Image: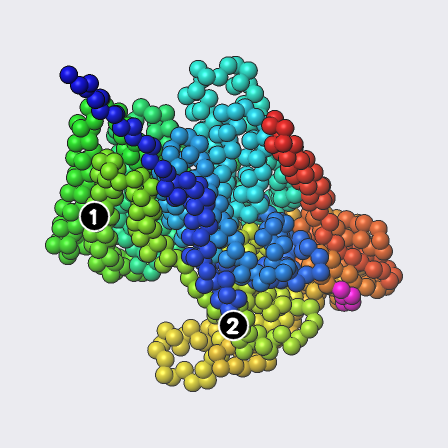
């Protein structure tokens, strides 16, 4: 009997990883850079720029003007009669992108900044998701989604690179904090502090502040969730390092925060203005529908919601909406699912402002919360939370990690949940498509009372008409969301079956999510011509720019450039313009009250207010000689404008605009020989008085102890030797003691030196600068000397250098 030959058992060789799997991390990092590079590529051309509203109104011109100065300007003399550069807690020209503008056109640097920001947003999200246990594949999908969330990707519409920077750097900050909490190593807390400082310098203070509050809650969650793995000394170390990180942030930001603290109380913003102000620009509750149907409340010109306008989206894709729901339903026991579910809910409730009591709690208890308005800005944290939840859910599904023992039963529950979502969208779509007229009427009836109360009948009617105009887009948006829901659920189905490689599914998911998000956010990527063309001089500007003396222009409300920086672009000083945080006293002087906008009723009603502002020219409309062709109301309006300008001399009559000369203006600098001492708003009342003559007398708040003259003397005019952003030099000659007034805004950082000796700088006529002058010839120098800035700059530089040096040593020696 022959030997039985045993069959050789075949040993299955492990499948060799695909090239893409082997180099996945590198490929994704390259992809995260390429996506924004392609998205913004057309704007790298100097002949084109991102035409974001705030960027065009303000930021570009300030950047261009700052680069043109011989030294770093700390004062803007061309707008609102002067305002500090460091009037708000933002880094402005002190950070890396600002330095690039000295060698690259500012509008191109803006594009480079957006590309960098988008890349860092994706990179931060990617490494953070991997750190909390999400596979590199699912993390890649979450990272790409975060790069193009509405709160980040629609920032170009407003030209808000600062807002985008805060949103983009948040994942990096939380990544380093997580590493620090996990490893208890100081270097991670220092890295977190450095990135946070970058977020403050390049970003928006309010958004970074919200991010830090979120991270504080995250740290508490982490220490509680992992308390069993940590000994008391570990927790103590983590808390100590966290406090050190906060101290470092303050040191890094000293160059910005100390000047703000030094000028506290002078700026129009930065003080609490009550609960109603703090809750203004909240996210309307009905706009939560936009998270599923992004066209519900209307995009851009079709927006009909309760804010006066809306130039952004909160949409972050159907994938995140569906998969986040799966995470909450099926993976609730996981610690990060619990944290992000609860924290995201809290963030959404805060974003809704006064619609819920949650905002009131934070407003009352959390330091700094009451200083801001626009709580809707916090919503980027909700977007991040949804993406984290979605990534966790998809990763668990793809790796077949159901919570229940019975996998088939679990799959059925997922399929049923998905079917319900699709069915609900289809039913809503059918109802809305077939019942258009009745639904539009119902929406208008529901919204009308609040719109009328909030905006008045005219604006309310306009918004109600937009509901009708936007309705087809709304219905299309329902079908759109249903289609993407089906596609993403199909992706989940393929992940369950595990017959397709995960990296292939992820690449497909990335492609689909880009198809979902990009067509929407790209609507918020406005293009404009090169700055030279966009800011080309109009006829009025061409006339005024020929005058090289020191004066201001009043861009009257009938001029298209009243509230932008067109005049500054042409180096013309203006009583108006646009700046986020003007000096409060000046706003009260012109009659704007607590507004930060240029609203000058006092300049229109009290001509001597304009005279005292050194306004030489007024720009207004060219009025028709024959008004008979106009209706009665228009004729009355033209006549009122004609009466207003009748005080001034017409010196240029253009096709569209005319320029008027103010022959009554006071010089930029002048000396009067008498004064009164009043306080607060009494001064404004006195300035409005018909018997007050600013050519003979100044109103001060403190007694300069100069004898009053027996007779009235008219003012004399010093010679302005040089007039720069940070320094004004005058030559003064007087045969009797007097008060020299410089009609630029007073600020505590301005110092005055008479013949090299520092004198007290008085506040004259409510908002201007003044200094007592003795008889004789003198050199008077007004100089912006910010001890707070100088001290803060030294502190910040030392803190940065020492922190970076420590991190280098720590990395080398694995400390």
Q: Residue at x 43, y 46 (%)?
A: 27
| In the image: residue 395, left or right of residue 641 | left
Q: Quadrant of the C terminus?
A: top right
Horizontal and vertical percent for residue 535?
53, 70
Asked which secondary structure carries label 2, the reply is helix
| Span shown in magenta | 717-722
The secondary structure that dominates the magenta segment is strand
Task: Residue at the far right: name it.
Answer: 776
Mark 1 vs mark 2: which is more N-terminal?
1
Q: Residue at x 65, y 43 (%)?
A: 255
| In the image: residue 653, left or right of residue 763 | left
Horizontal and vertical percent for residue 601?
51, 61
Q: Which mark is residue 482?
A: 1
Q: Residue at x 21, y 58 (%)?
A: 472
Asked which secondary structure carries label 1, the reply is helix
Q: Is residue 765 visible?
A: no
Tag 2 residue = 533
Q: Is residue 656 visible?
A: yes
């Amino acid at each position: 009997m022959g030997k039985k030959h045993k069959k050789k058992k075949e040993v299955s060789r492990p499948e060799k990883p695909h090239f893409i799997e082997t180099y996945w991390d590198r490929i994704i990092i390259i992809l995260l850079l390429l996506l924004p590079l392609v998205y913004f590529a057309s704007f790298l051309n100097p002949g084109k720029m991102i035409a974001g509203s705030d960027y065009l109104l303000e930021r570009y011109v300030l950047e261009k003007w700052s680069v043109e100065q011989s030294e770093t300007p700390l004062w803007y003399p061309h707008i609102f009669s002067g305002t500090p550069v460091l009037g708000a807690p933002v880094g402005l020209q002190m950070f890396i992108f600002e330095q690039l503008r000295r060698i690259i056109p500012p509008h191109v640097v803006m594009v480079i900044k957006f590309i960098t920001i988008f890349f860092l947003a994706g990179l931060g999200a990617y490494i953070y998701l991997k750190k909390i246990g999400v596979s590199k594949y699912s993390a890649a999908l979450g990272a790409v989604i975060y790069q193009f969330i509405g709160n980040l990707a629609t920032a170009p519409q407003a030209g808000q690179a600062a807002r985008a920077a805060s949103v983009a750097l948040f994942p990096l900050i939380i990544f380093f904090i997580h590493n620090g909490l996990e490893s208890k190593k100081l270097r991670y807390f220092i890295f977190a502090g450095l990135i946070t400082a970058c977020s403050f310098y390049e970003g928006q203070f309010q958004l970074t502040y919200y991010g830090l509050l979120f991270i504080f809650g995250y740290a508490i969650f982490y220490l509680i969730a992992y308390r069993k793995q940590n000994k008391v000394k570990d927790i103590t170390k983590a808390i100590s390092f966290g406090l050190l990180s906060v101290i470092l942030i303050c040191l890094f930001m000293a160059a910005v925060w100390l000047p703000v603290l030094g000028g506290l109380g002078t700026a129009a913003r930065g003080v609490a203005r009550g609960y109603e102000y703090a809750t203004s620009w909240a996210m309307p509750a009905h706009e939560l529908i936009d998270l599923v149907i992004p066209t519900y409340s209307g995009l851009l010109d079709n927006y009909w919601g309760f804010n006066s306008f809306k130039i952004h989206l909160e949409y972050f894709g159907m994938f995140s909406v569906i998969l986040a729901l799966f995470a909450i339903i099926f993976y609730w026991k996981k610690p990060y699912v619990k944290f992000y579910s609860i924290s995201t809910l809290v963030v959404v409730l805060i974003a809704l402002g006064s619609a819920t009591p949650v905002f009131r709690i934070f407003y009352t208890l959390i330091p700094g919360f009451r200083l801001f308005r626009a709580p809707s800005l916090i919503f980027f944290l909700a977007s991040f939370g949804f993406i984290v939840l979605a990534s966790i859910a998809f990763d668990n599904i793809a790796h077949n990690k159901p919570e229940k023992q019975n996998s088939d039963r679990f799959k059925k529950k997922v399929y049923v949940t998905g079917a319900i979502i699709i069915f609900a969208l289809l039913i809503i779509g059918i109802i809305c498509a077939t019942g258009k007229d009745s639904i539009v009427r119902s929406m208008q009836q529901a919204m009308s009372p609040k719109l009328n109360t909030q905006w008045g009948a005219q604006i309310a009617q306009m918004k109600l008409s937009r509901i009708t105009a936007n309705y087809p887009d709304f219905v299309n948006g329902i079908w759109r969301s249903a289609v993407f829901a089906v596609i993403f659920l199909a992706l989940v189905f393929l992940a369950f079956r595990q017959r397709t490689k995960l990296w292939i599914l992820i690449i497909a998911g990335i492609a689909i999510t880009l198809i979902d998000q990009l067509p929407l956010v790209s609507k918020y990527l406005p293009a404009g011509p090169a700055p030279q063309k966009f800011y080309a001089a109009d006829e009025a500007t061409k006339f005024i720019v020929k005058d090289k003396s020191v004066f201001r222009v009043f861009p009257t409300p009938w001029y298209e450039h009243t509230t932008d920086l067109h005049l500054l672009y042409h180096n013309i000083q203006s009583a108006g313009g646009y700046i986020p945080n003007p000096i409060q006293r000046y706003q009260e002087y012109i009659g704007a009250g607590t507004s930060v906008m240029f609203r000058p009723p006092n300049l229109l009603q009290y001509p001597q207010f304009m005279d005292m502002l050194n306004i030489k020219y007024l720009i207004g409309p060219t009025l028709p000689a024959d008004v008979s062709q106009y209706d009665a109301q228009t004729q009355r309006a033209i006549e009122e404008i004609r009466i207003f300008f009748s005080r001034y001399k017409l010196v240029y009559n253009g096709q569209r605009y005319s320029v008027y000369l103010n022959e009554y203006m006071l010089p930029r600098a002048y000396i009067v020989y008498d004064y009164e001492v009043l306080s607060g708003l009494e001064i404004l009342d006195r300035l409005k008085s018909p018997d007050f003559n600013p050519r003979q007398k100044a109103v001060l708040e403190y007694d300069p102890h100069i004898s009053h003259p027996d007779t009235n003397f008219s003012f004399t005019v010093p010679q302005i030797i040089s007039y720069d952003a940070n320094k004004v030099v005058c030559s003064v000659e007087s045969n009797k003691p007097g008060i020299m007034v410089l009609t630029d805004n007073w600020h505590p950082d301005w110092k005055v030196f008479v013949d090299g000796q520092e004198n007290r700088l008085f506040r004259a006529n409510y908002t201007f600068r003044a200094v007592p002058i003795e008889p004789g010839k003198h050199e008077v120098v007004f100089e912006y000397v910010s001890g707070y800035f100088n001290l803060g700059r030294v502190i910040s530089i030392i803190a940065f250098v020492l922190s970076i040096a420590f991190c280098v040593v720590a990395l080398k020696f694995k400390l």
